[in-house]
Amino acid sequence: MTTFPKNFLWGGAVAANQCEGAYNEDGKGLDIQDIMPRGIKGLPTDKPTMDNMKLIGIDLYHRYKDDIKLFAEMGFKVFRTSIAWSRIFPNGDDAEPNEQGLAFYDALFDECHKYGIEPLVTISHYETPLHLARKYNGWVSRDLIGFYENYVRTIFMRYGKKVKYWLTFNEINSVLHEPLMSGGIMTPKEKLTLQDLYQAVHHELVASALATKIGHEMMPEAKIGCMVLSMPIYPLTPHPDDVIAAMKADHMNYFFGDVHVRGQYPEYIKRYFRENHIELQIEDGDEEILKHTVDFVSFSYYMSVCETADLEKKKKGKGNLMGGVPNPYLPSSEWGWQIDPQGIRYILNMFWDRWQKPLFIVENGLGAMDELIDDEQGGKTVQDDYRISYLNDHLVQVNEAIKDGVSVMGYTTWGCIDLVSASSAEFKKRYGFIYVDRHDDGSGTLARYKKKSFFWYKDIIASNGDML
Ligand code: BG6
């Protein structure tokens, strides 16, 4: 028997820009993803180009009813998606919202509720309106706080009765690594000063706390969380220099959670700012706003990394936006992401010990190449035992963390239906329980097929984890 709480929120997660498609329909403005045909692996283009897989995505915009029906068949209690900011405010700084965009999410959330599925909404998931990136340089500009405030007021007002769980920014700490994708910052990474980068971080942190404040005022029943990219950082050796290097690297991630949970900047990051000549422009009132802390902490978990003080060994490994020094004890996925199920137990314990806030795992999964084959019933399927064992191993460790006393609200696997990769914009990197017939050369019917993992996850949810 496992120990998952009775109301554990089992489900799956996606983001608007990776699956909706319909990039220019019903009044949607362009967002940064529309000009990033190679994700973070290539340069942005001047305008959308048809080799950009995200423009069509999996056409969820037109097929959401069928897809949500499949999620319901698996027994989802929660479905995490984002609102595409530029469907609501096409340029980001518009005075009035776009009614067609608002109506789309009304219909999407209604469809979830039809099956008793609770929507979990990311307010900003790597889809800053392009105009805000080009005109203001994204979050480097303080003006973004005001535009984001208008946007959150609009969506809280509209969906306050339909959406109980909100996340302010997807993987807010990733802006340190991918300023364009995460923060809509057009200045190339190599030219961006630490001063501008951390000023952008400050603006996002203030905006996030402001959203929490406004959300609590407008929707007293709502639960508002932050979302961080979690990546346990182990010292490469027990040498104290490596231990301190790992601690410092951890700090660069922890401070985002610390601000969200404790409502102020921790001393160690102030030291980092001082030593790197970063002088944040903190305006009157900012510190008061930061005191509006979150109800829960959510995070993505895919892998752990190592850190060392030895510059020779510091060669970066592959990984989810951040990368790190590879761990000699761990296997890797086809994309070089190291697989570490115990890391999820470790990070759950670390976060719980540090913050004592309920935790929500809102992304975890294996990106892999799948082969669609004929099944015995004359249909098609994928025998994705590798995905089942990845997810099963991680969930076993989540169960261990719950036994350790960690409060875990729920678990949404990443890309519960195949979608376009964020980092590489490829389609062949599949995460889903549902196979989508689409390929990187643009071919495919967009038809959906249930993989073996579809039935596995259905059993796990139905047994509340007992079938792990
Ligand atoms: C997270 C993002 O970093 O990882 C998702 O929040 C992303 O948007 C996921 O899709 C998996 O990364 P990738 O690059 O394999 O799509």
Image (cartoon, grey):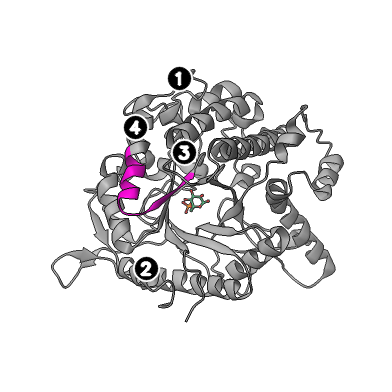
Position of 198 with respect to 109 (left or right) is right
Residues at discs 3 and 4 in contact (Cβ within 8 Å): no
Q: Is residue 414 magenta?
A: no
At x 84%, y 48%, the residue is 267
Percent position (x, y) of residue 221? Answer: 53, 46
Question: Image quadrant for the C terminus?
Answer: bottom left
Where residue 226 sits in the image (x, y, percent)? 60, 47
Viewer-nearest of discs 3 and 1: 3
* Residue type at tag 2: Tyr
**Depth check, front residue: 291 or 411:** 291
Residue type at numbered disc 1: Glu
Q: Position of residue 126 (x, y in %)?
A: 51, 40
Callout 4 secondary element = helix
Q: Amino acid at mark 3?
A: Gly
The residue beneath circle 2 is 457
Label 1, secondary structure: give it.
loop
For numbered disc 3, what is the local secondary structure? loop
Mark whose residue sits in front, 4 or 2? 4
Magenta stretch? Answer: 107-121
Residue assigned mark 4:
103
Mark 4 or mark 2: whose residue is earlier in sequence: 4
Q: CA distance from mark 3 to mark 1?
A: 19 Å
**Label number found at residue 96:** 1
Alpha carbons under labels 2 and 3: distance apart: 30 Å
Q: Earlier in the sequence, mark 1 or mark 2?
A: 1
**In this rendering, would 298 be left or right of 25?**
right
Residue 350 against residue 132 in the figure, above or below:
below
- The answer to the question of whether label 4 and label 2 lie on touching residues, with beta carbons closer than 8 A, is no
Determine which residue is flagged by label 3: 160
